[in-house]
Amino acid sequence: MPPLPPAAASSAPTLERHREESLFAFCEAALVAAGADAATAEAASRAMLHGSRFGVDSHGVRLLDHYVTVIEGGRVTGRPNLHFSEGAAAVATLEADHAHGARAAYAAMDRAMEKAAVYGIGAVAIRDSSHFGAAGAYALAAAEKGFLGLAFCNSDSFVRLHGGAERFHGTNPVAMGAPVAGEDPWLLDMATSAIPYNRVLLYRSLEQQLPPEVASDAAGHDTINPHAVEMLAPLGAAFGFKGAALAGVVEIFSAVLTGARLSFDIAPMGGPDFATPRNVGAFVMALKPGAFLPEVQFDAAMRRYRDTLRGSRAANGDMVMAPGDREWRVAAQRRAEGIPIDPATAQAFDRIAARFALPRPAPVQG
């Protein structure tokens, strides 16, 4: 397909904006109506609002329609029986019973923090899970409680290898959160693909062109047309072998170590089968800084590191930000102005509200 015309990239539609509280309540109610228990509805809504709050819109409330579909279809267990198998003192494996990915991941990180509080480190492998959402949600959950948090997850094949022309790895995200005493945490949340596929869907909804070197057509060639995308490129453009290898690190932690399916064995997120569980794997870890050195020393070093990073000399016309800085700025702006939703998500809200006889969240006025 030919690239979208330049005019399509610049004519952004007017977006609805909503208060976080009303979006959260609507997501919870819709998931319960679809068959989720309270814990699942809360966890999934919490993860989606993490994405929407911090500007990770590809993993925000636009996922609600998909989550309703997979719970109703049976792919995701709406009322799971989570089972932890305890290994060595600081280690556990979570049999997630095909739970929503957020339900499993928040529970796993809670268990990892419990272990880290005692042993200095806690690690939980997750299998029989489903779509993870924004990995940063789980790393941040640890950082906000004073732990270093790490989260990995594999997903169905959608990313070519460097020089490849077929899907191999999933987008396989990596996230890490670090506490900064008295301040917002340091937060990294990244796919090992150049972009996540949900961002392609977002650009389709907005009729905007993609940046170059982030996605490929069926032959493995670069495309900026979101409608022509058949696979994603690995992180790194000309040096994409680094992104492909990093995706392999996530694959080993999330699938090989957990006993879950490898990316190329996982059924596609987008269906058409929404009844068969996918057995997605994940891995979370928490570390207690005070187990390694006095916490006051850790706190001082983290502040000095981030302050010095932010104060380093920027190139002309550019600025230097620490991981998480953009997200915190977006969060502050959206608290004031409301969270935007794209047209496809607005239409999905209409359908969900009508189907379950729920009050549709009203946009912010003005």
Image (cartoon, helix red, strand yellow):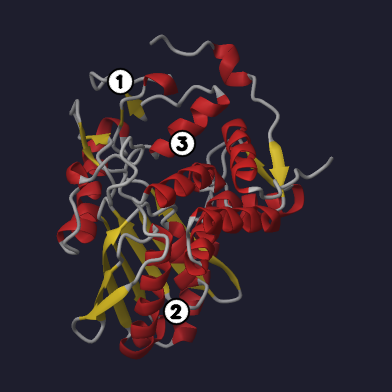
**Labels 1 and 3: the sequence-earlier one:** 3
State left or right for residue 299 relative to residue 18: left
Say if 131 sits above or below 113 in the image: above
**Labels 2 and 1: the sequence-earlier one:** 1
Q: Which residue is mark 3?
A: 199
Q: Quadrant of residue 216?
A: top left
Categorize mark 3 by other alpha carbons within 10 Å: few (<14), some (14-19), many (20+).
some
The kind of secondary structure element at disc 2 is: helix
CA distance for labels 1 and 3: 16 Å
Say if 302 sits above or below 216 in the image: below
Residue drawn at (34%, 41%) of the image: 269
State left or right for residue 108 relative to residue 205: left
Categorize mark 1 by other alpha carbons within 10 Å: few (<14), some (14-19), many (20+).
many
Residue 94: x and y in percent read 28, 71
Residue 261: x and y in percent read 19, 53
Q: Quadrant of residue 159?
A: top left
CA distance for labels 2 and 1: 47 Å
- Amino acid type, mark 3: Arg
Residue 295: x and y in percent read 45, 85
Q: Which residue is mark 2?
A: 298
Question: Is residue 179 something one can see in this rendering?
Answer: yes
The kind of secondary structure element at disc 1 is: loop
- Amino acid type, mark 2: Phe
* Dot 1 and dot 3 residues touching (CB under 8 Å): no
Say if 27 sits above or below 316 in the image: below
**Labels 2 and 3: the sequence-earlier one:** 3
* Dot 2 and dot 1 residues touching (CB under 8 Å): no
Residue drawn at (64%, 53%) of the image: 26
Indicate which disc residue 217 carries: 1
Quarter in which the N terminus is drawn: top left
